[in-house]
Image (tube, grey):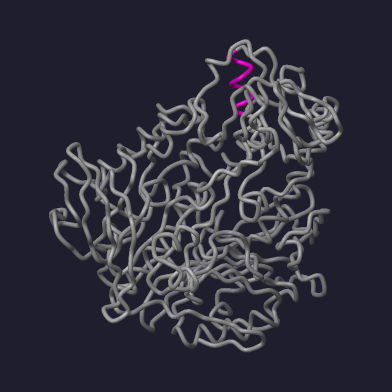
Amino acid sequence: MTVTTSVKTVLETLPCTLPTEKIPDDVDPAAIATTFAQRINDLSLEDFTSDALWRDTFALTGSLRTFYSAVSIIPVWRKLCHSRGATAFALLPGTAHVRRTGPEVCWLDVSFTFETENEPATSCYGFLSLVPDPDQSGNWKIWLLRTVLEQLQGNHGNVDQLAPVMSDSAKLNGFPKAVDGEQHFDCVVVGAGQAGLSTAGRLQALGVSYVLIERNDQVGDNWLLRYDSVKLHTTREYAHLPFDRTFTPDYPEWLTKHDLARGYKKWVAKYGINVWLSTNLESGVWDESRKQWILNLRKRHANGDCLQSISCSHVVMAVGGGCQVPIMPSYPGREKFKGVVLHSADYKNPFSWRGKHGVVIGTANTGHDVADDMVEAGLESVTMVQRGRTYVVPQEAYKKGADALYNAKIPSDVADRIAYSSPLVVSRQIGLLHSRYLAAAEPERFDALERVGFRVDRYGEVVYQLHEKFGGHYMDVGTSRKIADGLIKIKSDALPVAYTEDGLEFSDGSHLKADVIVFATGFAGNMRDVVREIFGSEVADVVEDFWGLNSEGELRGAFKPSGHPRLWYMGGTVGHARYFSRFVALQIKAAVLGTPLPIFESRGSQSIL
């Protein structure tokens, strides 16, 4: 089954068909999986469906790669298994099960492990997704192959395990923290949000000397400095940092910014993370002769700033790829308007606006939050200006799906491996199916919004929103009901063109009264721009952009070699941060050991290692 949309995205151009061959309820998954036990170390074209996919997460390719069709998979699989010395393939007993997605789509999953003997020697994990062969009764074929790097072999630590510290003394992997003067680290991580914290913890687990630098004064300030009502729109069980359940059941299901900051601070203290607060990376230079970075830091102290230089072999940029520069549309006549204009980046709360007329431009998560705040604060009127259709996800529907994988019984690392090892093109198709099921199950929810002028994208693509658009959707935590009930008005039939003394003029000639206008219009952000600002064009010109998808449907720049051998990008949702930080840390550890992961590259029809 292939689900299509009118939106042209990168993933829509890539081939993917969900399997719909029926699997009887009384099938024996273990017996079927066993037939692949001897074949898995020597797979052939006949073992795959013609439209099979293979997604490798650093296990054999040293990168994130997706291969499409059996004829593309087999030569690369054989070449890499040989060059990496892949061996010890073994199916994991008890893992075979049938997975059903809706009434039509189904397949059989079984897990396996294997190793690579050539340097760096590794332990790896994999999944076979099997489907019945429609041309030969009783025969099964591989529809989807997934391979994942798990650990570096040897006494190098476990990237998924970190023991809590026994005291509050500040340590750097067993050594005192740096004081004044230049000091060398294997790695410097820039930014102590969820991505930076996760990466720092993983590096510490592997015994890599590192320091995490954060320009704010406290861990968690990246949340605390946001608007008062902000909450995480994903569940508590999805929100953990690596190694443990950061947020115990005494935390609420939907975490506030204060909950997140408290959890992050406790996590940093528990594991003794080496973080330098009130420290800004001013500039940096790559020393090619010494193969290291020279970083110039500015540290804020009570008695004034001080400058310090440190050196390191690797830099991880975890500074927030989508939250850099506020996008603020410019309309003529700003000087005429007598009210308040601000971007959501500067918004805290609406309490001083009680009794006024509020306008919010933008209808994604933040726009809804601001409009909801305005209603609760008692503004005379609240209007949202909608510039395009908005994908609305009911929170209860999201929670039902999330709870099936992210819950108190399944460890986060196990859930992440299942969730994030699939090709995005497969995740997209499954997401589209769920969108259609939801739209069919709750039409009135969306009809009510349409009746008041709110244009809903009923069949949205959450994978597109997160990986190509970098947001723009709304997780409905209740504001949609206020819109449907008329507590929040919608202006969606025209766009603002100018300010007036008391509001906004629109392209259809209409006027909207406003005392305060909040632009919830997002941010222009690409970590490559930050790299250019700090390290200059010589470095920025060789690295990839951050985020968005390449021609294989893989994220650009993130988590893998960026184009510069010693500079890495980390970012994304908390799930991305928690899971993919393990691979950034493993790649850095392998490089520090002098045995970097060999990267498989393919150019056109030629593939090289």
**Residue drawn at 60 percent across, 74 percent down:** 36
Percent across and percent down for residue 39 are 58, 79
Q: Quadrant of the N terminus?
A: bottom right
User: Residue 608, how many percent across, how many down?
Assistant: 54, 88
Question: Would residue 29 be seen by someone viewing this image from the given angle?
Answer: no
Name the residue at 67% across, 48% down: 462
| Vertical side of 263 occupied by 281: above or below | below
Could you say where residue 331 lies in the image, as x and y percent from the top left? 70, 38
**In the drawing, does residue 137 fall left or right of residue 282?**
right
Q: Is residue 264 left or right of residue 84?
A: left
Relative vertical location of residue 540 with respect to residue 582 in this rendering, above or below: below
Q: Nearer the viewer, residue 126 or 461?
A: 461
Residue 565, picture quadrant: bottom left
Asked if the stretch drawn in magenta spans residue 374, the answer is: yes
Q: Is residue 271 left or right of residue 83?
A: left
Give the extent of the magenta segment: 369-377
Q: Is residue 328 visible?
A: yes
- Magenta: predominant secondary structure element? helix
Most foreground residue, 424 or 237: 424
Residue found at x 48% / y 53% = 571
Q: Give 420 or 7, whichever is nearer the viewer.
A: 7
User: Quarter of the image holding residue 116?
Assistant: bottom left
